[in-house]
Image: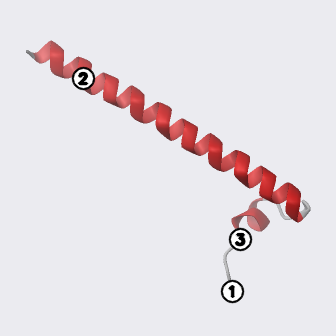
Amino acid sequence: MTLNFGKLLFPRLQPDQRRREMRILLFALLAGLAIASAVALAMLLLARTKLR
């Protein structure tokens, strides 16, 4: 038995709508992670240059 997060998160939607919502959610999470890592990298680089 496979774990289907789409069915857990959106139990009343049709399968094609569930896949679309999961794809949007995944892309939003990945974009947020990329932006957060870019901000953290910029903060680290700025802190490193101010210490010198």
Q: Which disc number belongs to residue 45?
A: 2
Task: Tell me where residue 26 appears, x and y as whole percent.
Answer: 64, 49
Residue of label 1: 1
For this orientation, the residue located farthest to the left is 52
In 3D space, how far apart are the residues under numbered discs 3 and 2 (Cα atoms)?
40 Å
- Disc 3 secondary structure class: loop
User: Does 30 sit left or right of 25 as displayed?
Assistant: left
Q: Disc 1 to disc 3, how far (Cα)? A: 9 Å
Q: Where is the N terminus found, in terms of image quarters?
A: bottom right
The amino acid type of the residue labelled 3 equals: Asn
* Residue 13 versus residue 31 in the image, above or below: below
Q: Position of residue 42 (x, y in %)?
A: 33, 23
Tag 2 secondary structure: helix
Above or below: residue 43 compared with residue 35: above
Point 49% across, 40% down: residue: 33
Q: Is residue 44 left or right of residue 11?
A: left
Q: Secondary structure at mark 1?
A: loop
Nearer to me, 16 or 39: 16
Determine crowd level at label 3: few under 14, some 14-19, many 20+ residues with C-alpha closer than 10 A: few
The disc placed on residue 38 is: none
Residue occupied by mark 3: 4
Q: Quadrant of the C terminus?
A: top left
User: Residue 37 location in percent, x, y?
Assistant: 40, 35
* Earlier-in-chain disc, 2 versus 1: 1
Q: Residue at x 82, y 58 (%)?
A: 18
Q: Residue 24 vs residue 12: left or right?
A: left
